[in-house]
Image: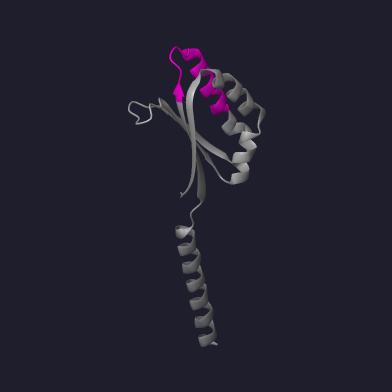
Amino acid sequence: MRNFLRLIITTLIVLSMCNASMGQNKSEKILNHVLLFKWKDGTPKETLNKSTLLLKGMTEKVEGFLALKYYNITNSSEEFNMIIIGQYSSEEALKNYESHIDHDKFVEMVIPHLEKFAVNDFWTED
């Protein structure tokens, strides 16, 4: 009986160690959607502010849209002057963002003011 109890206790300890180590190594993949803009000279700051606020609000409206960051670029080999980085839990989440009505509004708002535009997507593990 003692051997049986030792076996059960040992098995429980090993299983708990396996579960703990699996939890430590678990990482989620994140899809990073990077947009580079070169705004036309004279683009109103109000347009930039409204467009970025519209995008910020989408993280709450689109499931799987995890985060949004944007920065003014101070030095670029291609003369881009803004970068926007959206993070998504899946390709489906990115597609939902791209087909959302607020994304359409964003595109309508910024297209007349863009001189150049680039998109890059890549996966990272969190």
Q: Is residue 62 visible?
A: no
* Residue 114 position in % (x across, y down): 50, 22
In the rendered image, residue 122 lying in the magenta stretch gets the answer no
Q: Is residue 126 left or right of residue 90?
A: left
Residue 11 vs residue 83, the one in the foreground: 83
| Display coloring | one colour
Q: Which residues are magenta?
A: 38-57
Most common secondary structure along the magenta stretch: helix
Residue in the picture at 62% in, 23% down: 105
Q: Quadrant of residue 98?
A: top right
Residue placed farthest to the left in the image?
A: 75
Q: Is residue 31 visible?
A: yes
* Residue 101 position in % (x across, y down): 67, 27
Quarter of the picture holding the N terminus? bottom right
In the rendered image, residue 51 lying in the magenta stretch gets the answer yes
Residue in the picture at 63% in, 32% down: 61
* Residue 112 position in % (x across, y down): 55, 18
Residue in the picture at 49% in, 82% down: 6
- Position of residue 52 relative to residue 22, above or below, is above
* Residue 60 position in % (x across, y down): 60, 32
Residue in the picture at 57% in, 23% down: 54
Residue 25 vs residue 55, the one in the foreground: 55
Residue 53 vs residue 76, the one in the foreground: 76
- Disc tally is 0
- Position of residue 38 relative to residue 93, above or below, is above
